[in-house]
Image (cartoon, rainbow, N blue to C red):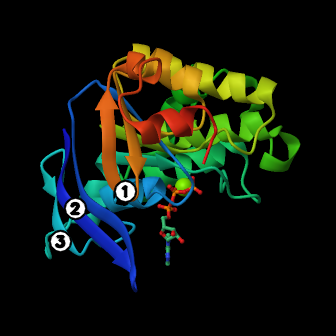
Amino acid sequence: IVELKNVYKSFGSNQVLNGVSLAIPKGHVTAIIGRSGSGKSTALRCIDRLEVIDSGEIQVCGHQVHAPDIDLRALRKDVGIVFQSYNLFPHLTVEQNITLAPCAVKGLSKAQAKDIAIRTLTHVGLLDKASFYPEQLSGGQQQRVAIARSLAMEPQVMLFDEVTSALDPQLTGEVLKVIEMLAADGMTMVLVTHEMEFAARVADTVVFMHQGKVWETGPGEMLRKPQTAELQAFLSGGL
Ligand code: ATP
Ligand code: MG
C-alpha cells in the first residue's frame, strides 16, 4: 500500500535520504526509529509529498506520489498525517475542527460530517469535548482531537511524526492507547517514534534509519537483538 524505491533527497549539499527503500503492506504498523537528523521526518513528509524527492519512486494507495501529474487532493484524501504540534484551529470548536475538511474537501453535508465527528471523537474517547475550544483541552486531548480530525477524512494510511514527544508520560499513554486501538482495527500506519517499548509491542516492522538509510529492519524483537553496532549504540543511548 506504501512503497519507497531507492529514494534520494537532499537539502542543498545535505544528503538526507540516501537510497531509502521500504514496503509497507495494508494493515501493517511500521515504526521508524533513529537519531535526530537521520531523515525520519523527511521520509514521512516525502510519502505525503510535503517534500519533493530528487530521485527514486514512492507509491501510496496506487498514487505515484512524485509523478508530475499527481492529484494532491486525491493523495491527501488517502493519507492522514499527524505531527508533534497538533495544529488545531484555535478559533474553532473540537467538532468544527473535525468537520471542516470533510465538508470542504469531500463535499459532505453538515449532518454527514457531524456523524463522522461523533464517531471519530467516540473512537478517541472525547465525545464529551465536542463543543470545547482547543485551549480548553490538555495537550494529550488536543493530540487525540488532531488524530480524530485526520481519521474523519477516512484515510487508507496514517502517518504519525513523534506525536507524543511534547507530552508528559501520562498524556503520552492516552495517545499511544488510541494508536494501539487503530492498530487493532487494522489501520495501516507509519509512526516515527522515540517510544521504543511501544514500537516493539505494536509495530509489525521496525525500521532503524541511520545516515539517511534503512540501516536495519525487522520485527519488534529486533530491538532486543540488534544486529548492527549502530542500532546497538542507538538503543543504549550512546554515541
Ligand atoms: P529528529 O529526530 O530530530 O526529528 P529526523 O530524523 O526527523 O530528526 P529530519 O527532520 O528528517 O530528521 O532531518 C534530516 C536532516 O535534514 C537534518 O540535517 C535537517 O537539518 C535537514 N532538513 C530537514 N528539513 C529541512 C528543510 N526544510 N530545509 C533544509 N534542511 C532540512
Ligand atoms: Mg523528525
Q: Secondary structure at mark 1?
A: helix
Can you tell which mark lies on residue 43?
Answer: 1
Specify few, some or many for label 3: CA neighbours under 10 Å numbering under 14, 14-19, or 20 or more. Answer: some
Residue at (16% x, 58% y) in the render? 6
- Residue 59 in percent (x, y) is at 16, 52
Q: Amino acid at mark 3?
A: Ser
Residue sitting nearer the eye, 40 or 178:
40
Can you tell which mark lies on residue 173?
Answer: none
Left or right, 105 with reference to 118: left
Q: Report how far apart the C-alphas of labels 3 and 1 lie in the structure.
A: 13 Å
| Proximity of marks 3 and 1: CB atoms separated by less than 8 Å | no
According to the picture, the residue beneath numbered tag 3 turns out to be 55
Q: Earlier in the sequence, mark 3 or mark 2?
A: 2
According to the picture, the residue beneath numbered tag 2 turns out to be 7
Image quadrant assignment for residue 29: top left
Instruction: Confirm if mark 1 falls within 8 A of ligand 1.
Output: yes
Q: Secondary structure at mark 2?
A: strand
Q: Earlier in the sequence, mark 2 or mark 1?
A: 2
